[in-house]
Image (tube, grey):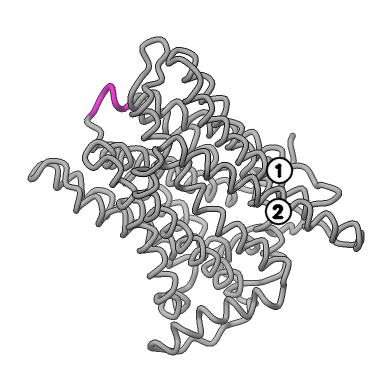
Amino acid sequence: MLPIFRPLKDRAVTTMWSGLAASTIGEDVFRVAVVWLAVEAAGNLAALVNAAQYGAMFAVGLLGSSIIDRWRPERAMIGAKLASAVLAILPVLGYYVWGVSIPLLVLSVMGLAGLRMVFTPAMQSTIPTLVRDRSLLQAVNGLFDATWRIARLVGPMIAAVLELIVPVIHFLSVTAIGFLLSGLAVYVVRQRLIDNDAPALAVKQGLRGAFEAVTDGARLILRERIVGIQLLLNALVNGPWSVALQLAIALMVKDHDPRLFGIDGLAAYAFIMGACGVGDVSGNLVAGSVRFKRPLSAMFLGYVAMGVGFILLAVAAWTLPPGAMLPAMMLAAAIAGFGGPFFFIPMVTRMQTAYRGAEIARVFRLRLVVMAASMLLFNLSATWLFAWFGATMVELMCGVLIMCVGVGGYLWFLRMELRSPEQPAP
């Protein structure tokens, strides 16, 4: 058995993982639906719909920390999933009154993004408590990260099938069901998520409390500088990644019309995203099971692969006829997806080793705030970049930027590891 699967022998881990998988698959179906509906309704302006969710994440992460930190993690997680189910179903209800409503979609997108800032840091803080055998921490992080990777594989495939059966708006109903199942799973294992020995953090009220909650995350990052550099670089790379993966590919499908065996349009987009999911899952199995001799520099090779994959997507769209374009774009998307887990899994494992309890939540929330700011900036810029250069050139530019971060990070940390060979692996 691969090391990444060993934690599934624990029933609580299996329950938590199953609920998270249901939720993340639902979210990926939601993302496919929202991006496609927005592209059809607004074209290049679809980037503004994406930007709205990152604006919500930034605001909640920056201003809501002092409130969120008062809640016990398991209660915050359950409440976030129940509220997410309600927000996911709102555009479906509105569909029967006004038809497809972009304002309701934006409201739903922003609400779900804000609630993600509640759920994800809380979950990260409970993983070391859920896992009683600390030697399995990397494997569990790989396993939980696999839910997001599997979602990128399964979600688009489900979307491609659902398109044949129901209107695209009902993809959101599937998302709501996934959120409810996830909340139920957390409720079932809630006793395993409570760490009575974790250090308590002082939480003040008002704007001063909000300010201190965010700056405390910065202080914690400065305490562990390598962890801080990893978290911030990961957050910043998410900006070009979101434009390249979530927006540019959909517009490229619209512009270049890749097709094969009758597969085109939304189905072609879903197949490309699904291929990215295949790469994600494959990379996750390796990154969650293997301990690298020089882990800090090896992490950045994942960004090199991701950037190269996005570059190849653009090259395929420019150079190949429609019949060959779709399989080539799928292969390039798989390469891009393969690289992601090599950075993320060691990063969160090191974070959970360096910090504990509420410290993990605050550090991870700061990472999400920086990530949201990066994604907001890039998605707002994407509207004009698409108009000036076209989606394919923007895809190429994002790929080059990510690849440069990967090469630079690899060389920098390789030099550090060669000077200090005693640097411990996560």
Query: Is 109 displayed left or right of 273 in the figure?
Result: left
Comes first in the chain, label 2 or label 1: 1
Task: Please state which amino acid type lies under the numbered disc 1.
Answer: Ala
Amino acid type for the residue under numbered disc 2: Pro
Q: Residue furthest top?
A: 261
Residue at the limit of the structure toward the front, as seen here: 388
- In the picture, the disc for residue 346 is 2
Magenta stretch: give its range: 162-166
Q: Nearer the viewer, residue 286 or 185?
A: 286
Crowd class of label 2 (few under 14; some 14 to 19; many from 20; radius 10 Å)? many
Residue drawn at point x = 40 percent, y = 16 percent: 259
User: Measured from the top left, where is residue 391 in percent x and y?
Assistant: 41, 37
User: Magenta segment: does it hold 300?
Assistant: no
Distance in Å between CA atoms under marks 2 and 1: 8 Å
Q: Please, what is the dominant secondary structure of the magenta stretch?
A: loop
Disc 2 and disc 1 in contact, CB within 8 angstroms = yes
Residue at 86% across, 58% down = 417
Nearest the eye: 417 or 280: 417
**Helix, strand or loop for disc 1:** helix
Question: Residue 286 occupies which quadrant of the picture?
Answer: top right
Residue 189 visible within the image: yes
Q: Residue at x 16, y 47 (%)?
A: 101
**Foreground residue, 347 or 129?**
347
Q: Which residue is mark 1?
A: 287
Residue 82 in view here: no
Quadrant the N terminus occupies: top right
> Residue placed at 48% from the left, 60% from the top?
374
Q: Residue furthest left?
A: 97
